[in-house]
Amino acid sequence: MPLVPMRQVLDEAAKGGYGVGAFNVNNLEQIQAIMDAARATKSPVIIQASRGARKYANDIFLYHLMVAAAEIYPEIPVVLHLDHGNSPETCKSAIDMGFTSVMMDGSLMPDGKTPSTFEYNVKTTREVVEMAHAKGVTVEGEIGCLGGIEDGHGAGLDGLSHLTDPAQAEEFVKLTGVDALAIAIGTSHGAYKFTSKPTGETLKMDRLIEIHKRLPKTHLVMHGSSSVPKELQDIINQYGGKLKPTWGVPLEEIQKGIRNGVRKINVDTDSRLAITGAIRKVFMEKPEEFDPRSYLKPARDAMQQVVTARMTAFGQAGHASEYAALSLAEMTKRYASAKN
Ligand code: G3H
Ligand code: 13P
Ligand code: ZN
């Protein structure tokens, strides 16, 4: 099956009432781990690359690895998505490369750090929607800024002002025409999300539910959604790592999100933890080994296990064979006719 537009995968997920994991990749082994997990669970899947990943792997390597994945796993609908595009130019280069979906993260300025204004976000995201939809490519936007509530992220004194404002989210979707919307409800990227198991005070699921009520047809996206399981932390620490105690997003909260309009769930850190734990174990237990395959294979297997578990928990398992890929040309026509 050719690479599919993300809009199709999310529309199908909405019909079926399930979520789809969007897993970050930087190399061959991560792509193999995800595709093997998708085959084992019969799951449609979103594979995403950040700007850092594109720089690390080189766009051409990355794209051709994904074309190989589509060829080797023809029964799996697979999306190639740009994670956190920082400007229309970055999104354009991904579209030109063959990505079937892009995120324009206009919640931040192009430095990827400074919060932007609503007007800037609308303008840049709208520009990307025009450009991407003309080629059948899906667009994810973001409103509100990711970041924890405990650490008082954002400018506000209450630690909440960086979260998504539901009324603004509604306005944003109307003004931009995005296919999917990333919202900020207190999650953050990386391993250190919460200092104890999150509660309704630190992970604002009520905010998500309110946004879904206002935007029942919009596919919501949860970033920073690794669960950071204690077992994976323990393996790393058991084999010489130094992770501080930390909590991620519990799977049952993600499942609650899925019941309330979340269709795309971004996971990177859990894969990183699984890979690192497996490599540390080989290095400690078999210090005589120096063939990279001796540690890259267990690393790939460990990532496959975690991705398999997420695909099962998100409900995407078993849905791979329910639809045939739409081409980008077909999507272009659909966007054009929806406009008229
Ligand atoms: O956006 C966060 C993802 O985990 C990607 O991280 O920018 O280090 O590749 P990265
Ligand atoms: P995690 O760091 O929780 O895996 O989040 C990844 C993410 O949101 C990528 O955009
Ligand atoms: Zn993210």
Image (tube, grey):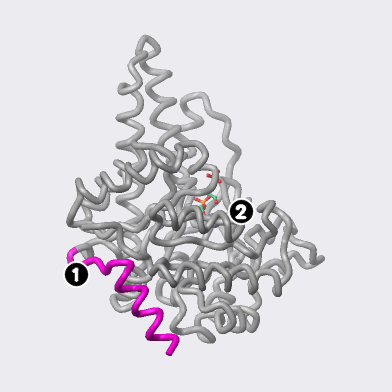
Left-right relation of 166 to 260: right
Labels 2 and 1: the sequence-earlier one = 2
- Amino acid of disc 1: Glu
Label 2 environment density (alpha carbons within 10 Å; few <14, some 14–19, many ≥20): many
Q: Which residue is mark 2?
A: 194
Which residue lies at the image location 35% right of the left edge and 24% below the top edge?
A: 295
For the residues labelled 2 and 1, the Cα–Cα distance comes to 37 Å
Could you tell me if the residues under marks 2 and 1 are in contact, i.e. CB atoms within 8 Å?
Answer: no
Spot the residue most to the top.
288
Foreground residue among 67 and 162: 67
Residue 273 within the magenta-colored segment of the rendering: no
Foreground mark, 2 or 1, reads 1
Which residue lies at the image location 66% right of the left edge and 58% below the top edge?
A: 148
Q: Is residue 204 above or below residue 196?
A: below
Foreground residue among 146 and 8: 8
Q: Which residue is mark 1?
A: 322
